[in-house]
Image (cartoon, helix red, strand yellow):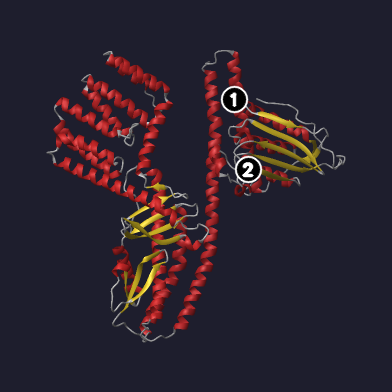
Amino acid sequence: MAQGRRLLVIHLVAVLLPCIIIGLVGYKWLRLEEDVQARRSKDAAEIEAAQLRQDLSQYLRSVNQEILAAYSRAQESEPPFRTPPGIPHVVTSAHLFSAKGALLYPDYDAALERAVRDYESSVSSRREWQQSLARAESLETQGKSAEAERVIQEAMKPEASPSLQAAQLLHLGRLTLAAHRYDLAESRAVRIFQCCAATRDEYGLSFVLYAAAQLVATWEARGRSQKEWPPLAERLREMLRKGIIGHPQDAHDIFELALPFRDQPISSSLLDEAEQTADRIRKQTETGRLLEKWIASVRPDSKSASLQFILSTFRSEGSPQLAGVYAVEDGRMLVALYPQEELTLWLQTWAQERGHFDVSLLQDSQRRQGNTPWNSGLSPEAPEFRLTLQARESDPSTQERRRALFAVALGAAILLTVIVGYYSLRDASRELKTASLRSSFITGVTHELKTPLTSLRLLAETLRLKRARDPATADELLDAMVVESERLTRLIDNVLSFSRIERGTRTYRKVEIDLSEAVMEAIERTHHIIKQAGFSLLEERSEERLQVCADPEALTQALSNLLGNAVKYSGRSREIRLGVHRRGREAEIQITDRGIGISKSDQKRIFESYYRAPEAAAEAAGAGLGLALVRHFAEAHGGRVTVASEPGKGSTFSLWLPLSSSVEKSSARESGFAGLSGRQDG
């Protein structure tokens, strides 16, 4: 993305800079030659108001786009209670909504609920931890604190979630604090700050504030609390500023922490910052909920480009406020609220730089009576707000000269800019797309190579260390090594084949072969994978002998790729159907799965080199070559490959090959099926 921006900037500077210089010189020259004062009339005011509304709408739309981009990055990467990023001074608040009008960001209550769900899912998913905790609490009630601590330490796992780690450290800290082991209690509380700062318990209470209370208790027991409190308070202030803590319910816990140290200045600063953060979150939450109810009445029609951004009126406590609703293609909406004073300042700046009238933005109740300037509505959806334009007492006047020449020169420059920019950006975008696809290809190939190599190494080390308990286990490990080596071989064959295709050196040795034998060979190659994944392979065989003129190895590779894809993208289904049919003068090989399926838009692109559908990329790793190789094979043999699929219901890939001339013509009514053979692998 950064490379794309750099290329765009380079092209724009190289093409537009000369045109901008010409335009500026011509503009100055034209301004010096102008000697006729522009007319100040109602018509001129209407034109200027229309341009003003258009520019204001474009400006506010660009502001919303910037905020949306910042919000999109912040939803996953930013701390849950941080001040929303990217809000300029012209906006008081901005909220992102889903296509159905539900509040997405900032939604601090949802962030709190996510933290609670993370804790509940972490604890409920670790049954051994619950058992260990119950046992530890039982031992603690019996006065066996040391044994209780040992039970909790044994239950701690490196792979545990931050929520679970925080709960474990908190229990251990409480036990060590009760046992007067203050150094250990303090270190465990500090570890919560380091590893689990954003975690909360099932009540939504911050583990960091639990840990802070534990630190204070430790210091009080050792008579060090007054000395140690300032660094801790500063650390909490930093976490408030970063948004790690700050929910309104945190303010009470922070007040309880700071109460014993209320005489210290740092405590007052901490409490003020906590209250300010809580007030900000309360106000933004309240505004977001009010907007959530209001947004349904002004939701733009996503099919209408003119309604992608609208200015409307939002009423809060009876006072109208200007709101901008920006609709995104995916249906989401960003609603920004604008202060009237800031918009008036922007309008006045615009009027000074580009206009011939003095401009103000007023509500109907603020309009002056008597010598009223010309008024124009700001937006049909915001009738309470109007633009007022007042002609200036004096304006510089100049005579228009050489306007036609200037217009022709500027038009030629713009035309040249459009032509050169179009072809330059088109070539650059193609290169960027190719580079992106190749990068994804390298990543996918590397991942797929690493997986079987890692498995082979682990299996070999297991055999070398003689960890197999019996010959049967050793055989299973050897079988697994065979599967992984075959998988590695197929991937390398795909890459080599595709490399030859790109170089134009890929050749096929076509011979007359029995199609059933080629299908059986492909099944044998993928038998281990099908069996290992627990799949059932149902075959539909034709009683008639079908022969095609093809490269046997390439045909086997193409069928193996289709079978491998069926295994990878079957989701929870464990059934694959393989059928061989005669269709007139063609043979059709069908491979059907009941997996994740392919959307209509992606069905047109899945046979492209390096391309992978988003659903497939999320399901399993890959290089994006298999289907491209199948298509190349089919077309090189005078055939084709087709797909019929529906998301969530599976896919059927059909490889069509022309029958050999030696095959006798069958009747069109002949079915050519022997029914289900009942073969099941796995």
**Image x and y of residue 284, in percent:** 32, 49
Circle 1: residue type: Met
User: Could you tell which of marks 1 and 2 lies nearer the N-terminus?
Assistant: 1
In the depicted view, which residue is nearer to us: 293 or 184?
293
Check whether the beta carbons of the residues at disc 1 and disc 2 lie within 8 A of each other.
Answer: no
Observer able to see residue 577: yes
> In the image, which is nearer the foreground, mark 1 or mark 2?
2
What crowding class fits label 1: few (fewer than 14 Cα within 10 Å), some (14-19), or many (20 or more)? many
Q: CA distance from mark 1 to mark 2?
A: 35 Å
Q: Is residue 230 left or right of residue 578?
A: left
Displayed quadrant of residue 568: top right
**Image x and y of residue 433, in percent:** 54, 52
Quarter of the picture containing the C terminus is top right
The residue at 35%/16% (across/down) is: 135
Q: According to the image, label 1 marks what residue?
A: 481
- The kind of secondary structure element at disc 2 is strand
Q: According to the image, label 2 marks what residue?
A: 646
**Image x and y of residue 132, in percent:** 37, 19
